[in-house]
Every structure is written in structure tokens, then in C-alpha cells.
Image: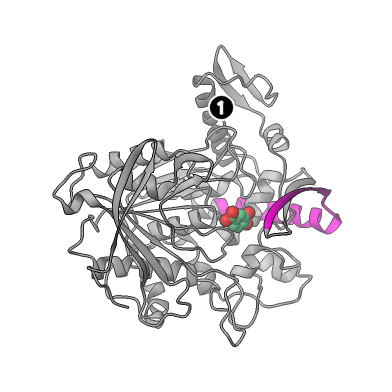
């Protein structure tokens, strides 16, 4: 691990008819004892203007925020991001190019993921590798790049889905001692890893409670619809629709998991902003359920205010241009179930999360008591401390963590990869601790991210100026 500040290239990219000039430092190994040098590396991009005493968007060399997106999906390894356009056909910048044009410094780390193996066949990217690497990358930046442009007290993480979960974890768990042994092991730089703000698109998080949250939401919908990725000749992925009905064991698991959710919610002692307790009755109804319904209702109202016609939504009651109530069961049937029960800790151990919680020599493990007890795969259980360090909700109320004070969380209204309750819990815990949380469910939006870069950058500008 070293940093040569003179070892950069000067680059120019264009979009929308204008040129973006920046300096690039590529493939910076951000730990002293890398386990996988292909992934424990990052790219750093800095707008050229800051080396010429210039300003962009009101930011100068000292004040420019540092945007730190990850590219992790499915808890797979994520490459170090590069500036470019979203597709070869479109003249639309990706988040990195957009951020540079907007005057941000960009640090784009690669992170290890669950499928990586060493030469001896052992796994090297199981939990908590991805979050350890993200923290190590922040530490590297703080340790080595102090005299380069960019305000290292304004680091903003960004990610989608599993990457959104990692962004949330960065925001929640800054400098927490729980991560120290793993950071020492890889030889992270001696610096802080807390961040200023976190942007999280559809975070697949609170994994050990995500099964119960999913069944609380989808209970009674036994048919599932999803697309399965298959590789065609030439390595081009195709998505095949797959539909089916849950079998008896899955329906049993659905009921079993749904029954666990109220006591989890009640144990959190969540409160609404008016101070009312957000609890659930044993049957899953109650103030927390009403709270989640209001998230959908607000989503609908925003869409109506934008002139969208929602009259086809029979589960939504409208009066004079106001969305007044949501039939939650109707909403859930409309968006349809994607995953069979249990959705994350599968009894067959076939999910991305089972693989995330594998170990050096085991590809997959369980991480919930329910699935371990009912396992059809008969294998081991992830250590409690590993499950814990992957869960941001466990650090928000922990005084030993430096939690980011500013958050932007987006969870598409049509997202079925995890329950809306998951992001709702995250937002509520953050608000309870006095953090600023910009949270909503964008209408008719599936599991996806970076779809509103103008809004994302406007938020960053608002919190940084
Ligand atoms: C992702 C999606 C999932 O449904 C999941 O369980 C984990 C990760 C993703 O898109 O990153």
C-alpha cells in the first residue's frame, strides 16, 4: 500500500456536448496485506479545475465533496468504477462522470465479494470482506490523499441493492471497534472510516430479519414471479420469466416467518416522528403496518402531483386528486411476490445471502435460527458476530459508532427484492437518533439505483453547502 501523487493521467470525457477534464489515479491497492489484489484496489478521479485554482459549481479544491460509489450487486465482487456513459447508445453520464462534471472528487473502490477464491480453493470474499474493504478504502483516502483536492470530511457513499446495504453500513458503523480485527488483518491504513453521508438505493439489509419482513408483507401471495438469468452464447445474459406456486413447505415457512415479525418490530421500540409507538399486533396489523402503508400512499401522491394517472390502481383510493388510502393486500398482489419463503436464508441454502455468510471452506451457511432449525441442507450457521457486522441497524443506536448524520434512502414502490419494511426500519432508527433522512419510495420503480442522479446531486449539494 503506497500512494504516488504524481502517478496520474489527465483524461477528458464528453457528454451532452461538453468536456469533463479530470486526473485519474487507477488501481490503488488500499491495504497492506491484500487477500485479493484484483479487488482490494480503487480508482481516484479529481476534476482538473481544482489543480488550476478553479471552481466548479461553487466548490473549490478544499470544499469539493468526495463521492464514493461502490459497484457491488448480489454481494458479488464489485469492480472499481470508471467514469463513462450509462450505455454505448446513450449520451448520459454514469454516476461517476456525472459527479465529476458536478464538481465532486470521486473515489471508486472495488470490493471483495462472496464468490472469490484463493488458489487453494478457499473462499476469500465471504462476509464481512466487502464492508472491511469499503472501510479500508476510506482509511486509505484519509491517510494518503490529504494534500489532494477534496474535503475528506465530506465523504458520501453510494450503492444499490447489496451495494446500497454496504453504503448504509458505512454510514451506520463509522470507526466501530467491531471491525478492527478484520481491518488489522488486511493491513488497513491508520485513519478514520466514518463518512459524512450515505446514499442507499434499495438496500438489501437487516438480513437476519429480512425473511420475516418479507413474509409479513407477502403472506397470502403464494405465487411468485421472477426472471432467471441465463448466459447465452458469447456470454450475453438473457432473462427468462419464471413463475410458480410455493410448495407446502414454503407456505409453512411463510406463515412461520410472518409470525416472527411482530415481536422483532416490538423489540425495536420504534417511534413515529410524532412520538407514537410503531408496534405490531400478533396478526401483523397495527401502527407499524399503517406507517408502511403511508410510505406507499406518499409515493402515489407524489406521482399524482406529477400528473400521472393512477386510476388503474384499484388498491388505491383517490378523492379529488388526493391519494387517501391504500389496500395493502391489493398493493402487494399488484407488485407480486418475487422470492419463495424464506426469501434470504433459504432452507436449501441457495441464495446470495447464504453464500455471503459462507466461510473460508464452506460456500453457504444459514444465518437465522428459523432456517437452521428447518434446514433441508443440514449445514452450519454463520457466527453471530459476522451476521452482526453486516447489519447497519445494529450500529445506529450504538454510541461507539460514528453514524453519518445525513442519509438519502430510495426504495422503489415496485421493489420486491426485499420488504419495504426493511428500509422503513432503517429510516426510523436513523431519524430517532436525530439524523436527517431523506427517504421515499419512488412510484412505479423496480429494484434499481442511480435513476435520479439530478436528485442525488441536488441532495449532496444541499447537505454540503
Ligand atoms: C441483490 C438483490 C437481491 O434480491 C438480493 O437478495 C441480494 C442482492 C442485488 O441486486 O444486489
Q: Is residue 247 magenta?
A: yes
Residue 233: x, y in percent?
73, 59
Q: Is residue 435 visible?
A: no
| Left or right side of 64 for 125 | right
Above or below, 69 against 136 in this view is above
Query: Which residues fall within the magenta stretch?
Result: 236-265
**Furthest-right residue in this view:** 248
Above or below, 96 against 72 in this view is above
Residue 324: x, y in percent?
57, 21
Ligand 1 is found in the corner quadrant, namely bottom right
Q: Is residue 28 magenta?
A: no
Q: Which residue is mark 1?
A: 300
Q: Nearer the viewer, residue 329 or 205?
A: 205
Q: Nearer the viewer, residue 406 or 135?
A: 135
Which residue lies at the image location 67% right of the left edge and 25% below the top edge?
Answer: 313
| Left or right side of 187 for 57 | left
Q: Quadrant of the N terminus?
A: bottom left
Q: Nearer the viewer, residue 441 or 460?
A: 460
Which residue lies at the image location 67% right of the left edge and 29% below the top edge?
Answer: 327
Residue 454: x, y in percent?
39, 36
Q: Nearer the viewer, residue 213 or 68?
A: 68
Amino acid at each position: 500500500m503506497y500512494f504516488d501523487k504524481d502517478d496520474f493521467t489527465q483524461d477528458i470525457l464528453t457528454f451532452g456536448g461538453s468536456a469533463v477534464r479530470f486526473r485519474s489515479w487507477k488501481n490503488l491497492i488500499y491495504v497492506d496485506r491484500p487477500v485479493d489484489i484484483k479487488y482490494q484496489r480503487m480508482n481516484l478521479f479529481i476534476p482538473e479545475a481544482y489543480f488550476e485554482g478553479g471552481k466548479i459549481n461553487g466548490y473549490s479544491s478544499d470544499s469539493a465533496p468526495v463521492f464514493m460509489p461502490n459497484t457491488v450487486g448480489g454481494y458479488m465482487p464489485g469492480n472499481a468504477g470508471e467514469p463513462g456513459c450509462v450505455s454505448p447508445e446513450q449520451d448520459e453520464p454514469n454516476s461517476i462522470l456525472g459527479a465529476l462534471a458536478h464538481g465532486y472528487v470521486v473515489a471508486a473502490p472495488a470490493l471483495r465479494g462472496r464468490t472469490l477464491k484463493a488458489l487453494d480453493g478457499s473462499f476469500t470474499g465471504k462476509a464481512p470482506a466487502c464492508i472491511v474493504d469499503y472501510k479500508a478504502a476510506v482509511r486509505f483516502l484519509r491517510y494518503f490523499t490529504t494534500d489532494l483536492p477534496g474535503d475528506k470530511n465530506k465523504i458520501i457513499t453510494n450503492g444499490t441493492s447489496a451495494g446500497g446495504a454496504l453504503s448504509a453500513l458505512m454510514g451506520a458503523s463509522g470507526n466501530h471497534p467491531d471491525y478492527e480485527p478484520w481491518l488489522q488483518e488486511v493491513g488497513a491504513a491508520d485513519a478514520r472510516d466514518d463518512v459524512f453521508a450515505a446514499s442507499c438505493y434499495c438496500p438489501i439489509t437487516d438480513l437476519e430479519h429480512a425473511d420475516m419482513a418479507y413474509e409479513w408483507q407477502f403472506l397470502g401471495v403464494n405465487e411468485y414471479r421472477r426472471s432467471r438469468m441465463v448466459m447465452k452464447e458469447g456470454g450475453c445474459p438473457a432473462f427468462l420469466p419464471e413463475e410458480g406456486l410455493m410448495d407446502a413447505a414454503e407456505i409453512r415457512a411463510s406463515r412461520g416467518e410472518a409470525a416472527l415479525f411482530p415481536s422483532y418490530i416490538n423489540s425495536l421500540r420504534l417511534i413515529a416522528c410524532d412520538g407514537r409507538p410503531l408496534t405490531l399486533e400478533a396478526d401483523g396489523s397495527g401502527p407499524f403496518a399503517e406507517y408502511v402503508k403511508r410510505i406507499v400512499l406518499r409515493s402515489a401522491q407524489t406521482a399524482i402531483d406529477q400528473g400521472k394517472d393512477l386510476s388503474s390502481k384499484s388498491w388505491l383510493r383517490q378523492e379529488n386528486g388526493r391519494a387517501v388510502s391504500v389496500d395493502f393486500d391489493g398493493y402487494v398482489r399488484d407488485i407480486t411476490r418475487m422470492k419463495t419463503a424464506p426469501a434470504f436464508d433459504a432452507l436449501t441454502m441457495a441464495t446470495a445471502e447464504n453464500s455471503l455468510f459462507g466461510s473460508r471452506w464452506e460456500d453457504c451457511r444459514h444465518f437465522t435460527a428459523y432456517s437452521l432449525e428447518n434446514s433441508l441442507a443440514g449445514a452450519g450457521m454463520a457466527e453471530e458476530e459476522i451476521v452482526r457486522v453486516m447489519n447497519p441497524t445494529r450500529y445506529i443506536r450504538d454510541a461507539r459508532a460514528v453514524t453519518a448524520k445525513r442519509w438519502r434512502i430510495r426504495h422503489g414502490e415496485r421493489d420486491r427484492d426485499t420488504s419495504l419494511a426493511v428500509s422503513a426500519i432503517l429510516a426510523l432508527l436513523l431519524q430517532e437518533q436525530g439524523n436527517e433522512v431523506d427517504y421515499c419510495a419512488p412510484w412505479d420503480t423496480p429494484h434499481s439505483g442511480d435513476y435520479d442522479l439530478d436528485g442525488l446531486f441536488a441532495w449532496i449539494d444541499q447537505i454540503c453547502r
